[in-house]
Image (cartoon, grey):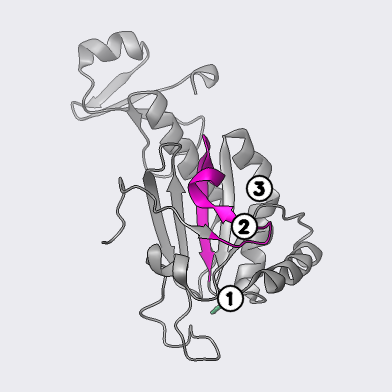
Amino acid sequence: MSLRLGSTAPDFKADSSNGPISFHDYIGDSWAVLFSHPDDFTPVCTTELGAFAKLEPEFTKRGVKLIGLSANGTESHKAWIKDIDEVTGSKLSFPIIADPERKVATLYDMIDYQDATNVDNKGLQMTIRSVFIIDPKKTIRLIISYPAAVGRNSAEVLRTVDALQLGDKHRVTTPINWVPGDDVIVHPSVSNEEAKSLFPNFRIIKPYLRLTPLKPEEK
Ligand code: BEZ
């Protein structure tokens, strides 16, 4: 069955660069960002992992655990992490799942179906760059897929975490290119009467588009 927003993130046990992992136990009461890589010792993946490692303190502040995946074994991951730290100046400490048989990648539908060059030396299709944001109830809240040739934007992943967490806390949605501090949209399910008490400074642009600031302490 395909995974969709709202699906329960499948649980699994796997080895990782930090030892064996039971995925739901690893998430615990936190949020998680699970992101896949096609292969160890590849250039785009190296830059991505360094960037995620450097941004990890920001994810931690938001109660989010990072966990990568690449279709290689733990010894390869450990050697690659040394390179990643050397090349990017990171201190990568979150686990990278070892998935040489593509078991987790198959469970999460991360296998490449369109890029004939994204294959390993046995001709097996590798993984794409999937991102899954999973909440503490283990519900998949966001899925992004990039092809192997296009590196992700780590700041965008953090931004979407902020938007999801804000929407869970307040009855708001976030407009195009929203970043923390920008005005947000009053959720369509909130009447104007309710909005007056919930968001005293809201303004009506159109009956269907109402904007409001949120004070930093409300975020
Ligand atoms: C990379 O990380 O650079 C990469 C990996 C697999 C295919 C293409 C690029």
Residue type at mark 3 is Leu
Residue at screen point 58% across, 44% down = 65
Q: Which residue is mark 3?
A: 55
Residue at screen point 63% across, 54% down = 52
Neighbourhood count class around disc 3 (C-alpha, 10 Å): few under 14, some 14–19, many 20 upward: some
Q: Nearer the viewer, mark 1 or mark 3?
A: 1
Marks 1/2: CA–CA distance: 20 Å
Q: Nearer the viewer, mark 1 or mark 2?
A: 2
Residue 145: x, y in percent?
41, 63
Depth order, front residue of 67/209: 67
Quadrant in which the N terminus appears: bottom left
Depth order, front residue of 191/128: 128
Residue type at mark 1 is Asp
Marks 3/2: CA–CA distance: 24 Å
Residue type at mark 2 is Pro
Residue 20 image label: 2
Q: Is mark 2 within 8 Å of ligand 1?
A: no
